[in-house]
Image (cartoon, rainbow, N blue to C red):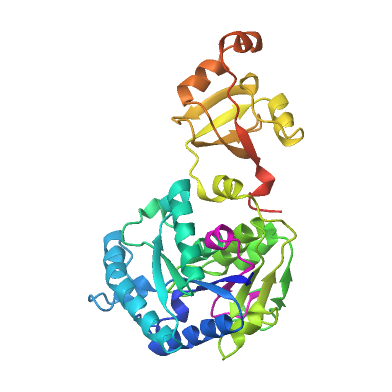
Amino acid sequence: MQSRIVVKIGSSSLTSDEGGLNRDKVHFYANELSALRQNGYQVLLVTSGAVAAGFTTIGYRKRPRVLKEKQAAAAVGQALLMQCYQEAFAHNDIPVAQILLTRADFSNRQRILNALMTVEELLARGVIPIINENDTVAVEELKFGDNDNLSALVANLVKASSLLIITDTDGLYTDDPRKNADAVRIDRVEQISDELYRIAGGSGSSVGTGGMRSKVEAARIAMRGGVPVFVGKVAEPGDLLAAAQNKGKGTYFDTHLHTLPAKKQWVGFHSFPQGKVYVDRGAEAALLEGGKSLLPAGIRKISGDFHPGDVVEVINPDQQLIGRGVVNYAAWQLQAVAGLSTDEVKKRVEVPRIEVIHRDEWMAVD
């Protein structure tokens, strides 16, 4: 089986400082991706750049901030972006396909599995899937915000052997190298800590939306799915292949974790919890230490309006999130069950179980 690599390229790597596509840059990256193909890799591209490509075309002086303006710019820019990619890859006789996704697609298991089947068929046919967020229809509060997290979710979904996040900086430094000449690059990361998030800081370019912090967050998501990550620079021919072969100009995020099953990935990373279930100490211990499912006797209260098949968060007596699970009963049914004693539950109610995905399998900091 060919190694499967997801490559993410951001807006600042594809556009000029003023906005608009830089066709020379697009052709350069198309050649780099084609070289991966020629060396036996299956390639998926997660690209930004639609808004940046489109806003100057429709008359905005700078990248828009109002949602409707960003959506309009994306509607124009996405067509320009794909046209440019098609022309660039055509020089190497490689067909490409456009796939636009939103968070809502990931939260619906059937929709995201359909997208996965499409990706698998495209790869089998020698087509490079080019994936972007569907900015034109995405709701602001549910947007990815940048495509770093999208690339990590895609890498987990397709069980990639690695995720390469290309940026204009050659990796993660102990401080901002543009301001501190003594900053040192971190070559390898095995665990993501609060200190690493602090080092990563905020956003960088005014053209894109993702700074180094969002790339560290994306690395966390991919690592939780068992996918190692490279974050760094690709500036010269051969740099992308070098990055894929562990010789890149950047930071490597290694992982000792095994790939989570598809259902656990969906519950942990893709789903939107529809409510909360608060449990007592006994239920907490049974879930975290005994590997048990949640029984109604351990439920103290619930919040939210959820239905069978929805994802809920499980909260301990200290108000800490300890996991997520798919509930088999509606909120009103669990509310009724939680008010009964254990004996009454056994006599009068079919026991609903919530199979819980433990917090440590998907939460933020090691």
Q: How many marks?
A: 0
Q: Residue 210 appears at what percent x and percent y?
A: 49, 68
Does the stretch in magenta take in 167?
A: yes
- Determine whether 324 is above or below 340 in the image: below
Residue 305 percent location from the top left of the image? 43, 30
User: Quick one: which residue is furthest to the left in this view?
Assistant: 59
Q: Is residue 262 above or below residue 239?
A: above
Give the percent coordinates (x, y) of residue 207.
41, 75
Please name the residue shown 39% across and 84% down the image: 16
Quadrant showing the N terminus:
bottom right
> Is residue 97 rendered to the left or right of residue 252?
left
Q: Is residue 285 left or right of residue 364?
A: right
- The answer to whether 118 appears left or right of 354 in the picture is left
- Asked if residue 208 is positioned above or below residue 21 in the image, the reply reads above
> Observer-nearest residue: 350 or 362?
350
As for residue 346 lying within the magenta part, the answer is: no
Image-quadrant location for residue 346 = top right
Q: Is residue 54 visible?
A: yes
Residue 180 at least partly seen: no
Could you tell whether 78 is left or right of 222 in the image? left
Segment colored magenta: 153-172
Residue 245 image offset from top left, x and y in percent: 68, 79
Q: Nearer the viewer, residue 155 or 322?
A: 155
